[in-house]
Image (cartoon, rainbow, N blue to C red):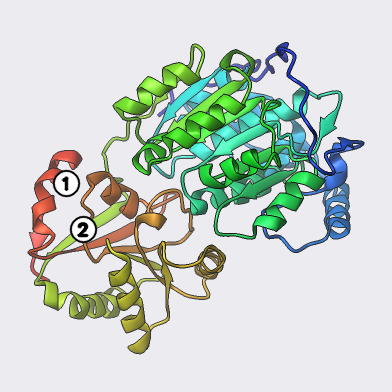
Amino acid sequence: MLKKLFKSNASKPAPEPKKPAAAKKAPAQNNKPAQNTKSHGSSRNAGADKSAAQSRKQKKETVETPWSLSDFNVEPQEGKTRFHDLQLPDSVMRGIHESGFQYCSPIQAESLPAALTGRDMIGQAQTGTGKTAAFLLTIFNRLLTVQPEERFASEPRALIVAPTRELALQIGKDADALGKYTGLNTLTVVGGMNYDSQRKMLRDHVVDVLVATPGRLIDFMRSQDVFLDQVEVLVLDEADRMLDMGFIPDVKRIVRGTPPKEYRQTLLYSATFNFDVRILIDQWTTNPMKVEIEPEQVTTDRVDQKLYLCAESDKYGLLERVLTEEKPERLIIFANRRDLTRNLCDKLNKNGHVAVLLSGEVSQDKRVRTLERFREGRVNIMVATDVAGRGIHVDGVSHVINYTLPEDPEDYVHRIGRTGRAGAKGVSVSFVSEDDAFVLPDLEKYLGTKLELTQP
């Protein structure tokens, strides 16, 4: 519960800082001054096949639809902060309205007042609590209230770096929804997707917000298809995960490519910040405000957790039994290894179920299509490694099954966090065999509770 409402003047934009003169760089091909930033229409994700003319037509139709802030009526409630209280631009409020949000989540309510004034921010909260919207709203407010005199292609004003392709694509999708009426252009660049298509978008269009994974961004920096010296807002999402995945050298290089920390706003949001990342935070930020939202429990109380003791050889039979008895509306089955998820997905399909696979061995294009099919409800079972454990927001996941328990206790929390979202109830079922039992002590220590094992 929040203790107070935001003050009405909390979102006053920070004055644009004077930046040191940058060395003249050789422009990339078609790196021309933009005559009209809005001419690029609605935000695009990498790989989009709509033409610029179609996008402009769609944008025109969107903007011309009548709407006013009076259409978005949210009554004040004690202890809750409305987005109305933040004095965000009307175009941003319209996106919030259409996305179905009314009141700020705790991480948003605590961090946005300071972030909207231009202060650096360190935000820590568990997955599914609205961290992405917090930094996207900060970016949109900044870019709409501070207008540069001249724009060039290949020079984003805001940069969001995420550790995985799926998370980056999800952020781009959220930016499309929240920024639908802002006229700002968002581009997502990730590995495993068409390089030339992404390169063309960078070189031929003014990009306001660039969402990227570290490896692909480094590629474009090396080829001088993107320049980061005009970045006003830098977001590092899930920085601890980037450290775990070995991306920190790349991230350090990316940060060095942006203006000095005194001349940019830096936002870091994550579920956890380990010691090594906290050291880097001091190097990357200036007097940051630190907001930490402690959950009442490490695992959400909206998820009914069941742990079944079984033999390894009995797991698939138990899975079929759970599917028959629980009748999940939408289910994610997690396993630790790629080969296990592949075999499990094949076996489910052979036994009359409709299941799809999401793992690192699946090509990026196919992973995107798989997620869309699952989101749209065309399939109701997805078998995945932990590539789907963080940052993948799919509404209506009723069940999560841990076919194997993860070795990292945090991954358990992230897995079951795929269900029980947005106030809904969820169910997690974990199969605990002789091979899984050795991780139980660390998991119970992390959760701070004794896990009850039952015979199925």
Q: Which mark is residue 443?
A: 1
Q: Nearer the viewer, residue 305 or 143?
A: 143
Residue 223 visible to an observer of this rendering = yes
Q: Quadrant of the N terminus?
A: top left
Q: Nearer the viewer, residue 39 or 74?
A: 39
Calculate the distance from the C-alpha at mark 2 to the C-alpha at mark 1.
Answer: 9 Å
Label 1 amino acid? Leu
Residue 341: % across, % down? 32, 70
On screen, residue 141 versus residue 294, left or right, reads right
**Could you say where residue 233 lies in the image, as x and y percent from the top left?**
63, 27
Vertical position of residue 282 compared to residue 153: above or below: above
Q: Quadrant of the C terminus?
A: bottom left
Report the side of 71 relative to 244 (left or right): right
Q: Is residue 100 visible?
A: no
| Sooner in the amino-acid sequence: mark 2 or mark 1 | 2
Q: Nearer the viewer, residue 93 or 386?
A: 386
Quadrant location of residue 103?
Answer: top right
Query: Is 233 rendered above or below residue 358?
Result: above
- Residue at point 73%, 29% (across, down): 143
Q: Position of residue 144 (x, y in %)?
A: 76, 29
How far from the left and from the top, in percent, is residue 252? 49, 29
Residue beneath disc 2 = 405
* Element type where label 1 sits in the image: helix
From the viewer's perspective, tell me whether residue 404 is left or right of residue 98. left
C-beta proximity under 8 Å, tags 2 and 1 = yes
Tell me the quarter of the picture where residue 31 sits.
Answer: top right
